Amino acid sequence: MNTESSKSLMLALDALRGNFRTTEYPLILGGLIYLRWAETQDENPGNDSHYKPILPASLHWSSWHKMPSAELAIFLRSQLLPALINLEDAAEGTIPFHLRMFGKSLDDFLQLSEESLSGIIQWLSEQPFDSATDRRKLLSVFDDLLLSSYSHHGLEAATPISLSKL
């Protein structure tokens, strides 16, 4: 458990209070993690000469996560959301499938204030993500969020299998 990261995440997610149920927090964070993950997959396709990028480079996390709040909100609503909803080759269980599902639920998230959107994205961008160890630590923080979100409702919580493979 990474308590410092978990505490800073809960502060970033405070902006969601009143707009979302706590059980929806993991969906929002999980989708954003998937967006970062998609970029790492596109950067490291392995030996597959027929690899087709999941997202165009203009939609990669690194191309937009540092945008000013107002510009970021416009980009997310006008470019990223439509692209996620219209992802092709999204066979069930694949990263494109999960990104498309996230895109379908992203509309409500995008109704947040520009500052709230930017704050959550900034938190995630500050988390190390380069190595498998970094991603496991982030998933541990995600698990903490799941536990705190669902334990109040008497539900079992664990990282979804597709996310744990990151």
Image: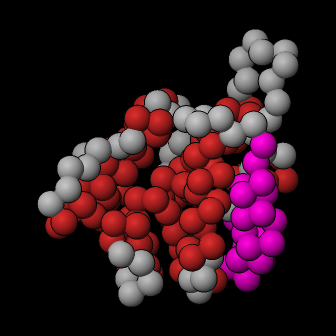
**In the current view of this chain or complex, which residue is farthest to the front?**
92
Count how many numbered circles sit on residues in the image.
0
Q: Nearer the viewer, residue 54 or 119?
A: 54
Q: Is residue 143 left or right of residue 112?
A: left
Indicate yes or no whether the magenta region holds residue 100: no
Residue 108, percent from left and from top: 57, 76
Q: Is residue 53 left or right of residue 32?
A: right
Q: Is residue 113 left or right of residue 153?
A: right
Residue 37, percent from left and from top: 60, 41
Residue 91, percent from left and from top: 65, 35
In terms of secondary structure, what is the magenta stretch mainly?
A: helix
Name the quadrant containing residue 75.
bottom right
The answer, for residue 117, to whether it is visible in the render is no
The answer, for residue 107, to whether it is visible in the render is yes
Q: Looking at the image, which residue is at 60% across and 67% down?
A: 106
Residue 81, percent from left and from top: 72, 64
Q: Is residue 10 left or right of residue 16?
A: left
Q: Nearer the viewer, residue 103 or 41?
A: 103
Name the quadrant containing residue 13.
bottom left
Indicate yes or no whether the magenta region holds residue 74: yes
Residue 152 drawn above or below residue 3: below
Residue 119 drawn above or below residue 55: below
Q: Looking at the image, which residue is at 59% across and 54% down?
A: 101
Q: Looking at the image, which residue is at 80% across and 72% down?
A: 78
Q: Nearer the viewer, residue 89 or 37?
A: 89
Q: Looking at the image, which residue is at 25% across and 49% down?
A: 157
First to last magenta residue range: 66-88
